[in-house]
Amino acid sequence: MLTEDGKHLYVSYDEYHNLCEKLAIRIHQSGWEFDTILCLARGGMRPGDILSRIFDKPLAIMSTSSYRAEAGTVQGHLDIAHYITTPRGEIAGRVLLVDDLADSGHTLNRVVEMLRTKYTKVTELRTAVLWTKGLSKFTADYSVEFLPTNPWIHQPFESYDNMRPEKLLEKWKV
């Protein structure tokens, strides 16, 4: 649900899963065949996992991090892992790069550049996201929703950002 001022988008688990399924449909209808899904951790892990299951393709993971300040709401320095975790040796062939959103586009631009220059066994690369914000400098090959007002997206699992074991003990009276 988008707030009236267009500054916040609240997404339920059902809506989130529906977006993942719509993304799968767009990829499938394109007719493009790929060998591996590479998700960007953390945001791309959930959609990457779902797409990996739907397409029955191996899931590789690359860690990136840029949201650190103010409880993860302000973009900071971008860190990109030097290694990719993959079940098949090293990443190669046709790769679908998955993240949750193209916000500024900075992360996706940098990762695509890195994959094209340092991972020469990747023969074809396409990108997929659930959301693309209006201010993004990156256009994914596959995207479900365009958000021209650039809202902050409140994903259904973000309550865990502030959840600590002590809170769980209290909640479950363990």
Image: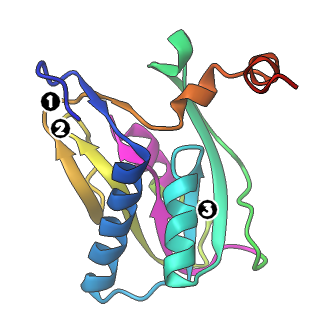
Query: Which stretch did the figure color magenta?
Result: 90-111
Q: Mark 3 — residue?
A: 118
Given this view, does label 2 or label 1 mark the residue nearer the observer?
1
Please give the name of the residue rendered at 30% of the width and 58% of the height, measured from the top-left corner: 140
Look at the image and say whether residue 108 sits in the magenta stretch. Answer: yes
Residue 80: x and y in percent read 62, 42
Q: What is the three-letter code of the residue carrying label 2?
A: Gly
Which labelled disc corresponds to residue 149?
Answer: 1
Q: Secondary structure at mark 2?
A: loop
Q: What is the three-letter code of the residue carrying label 3?
A: Lys
Q: Which is nearer the eye, 19 or 140?
A: 19
Describe residue 172's horizontal placement relative to residue 143 as left or right: right
Given this view, does label 3 or label 1 mark the residue nearer the observer?
1
Task: Assess whether mark 1 and mark 2 are in contact (beta carbons under 8 angstroms).
Answer: yes
Q: Mark 2 — residue?
A: 134
Distance from Cα at disc 2 to Cα at disc 1 = 6 Å
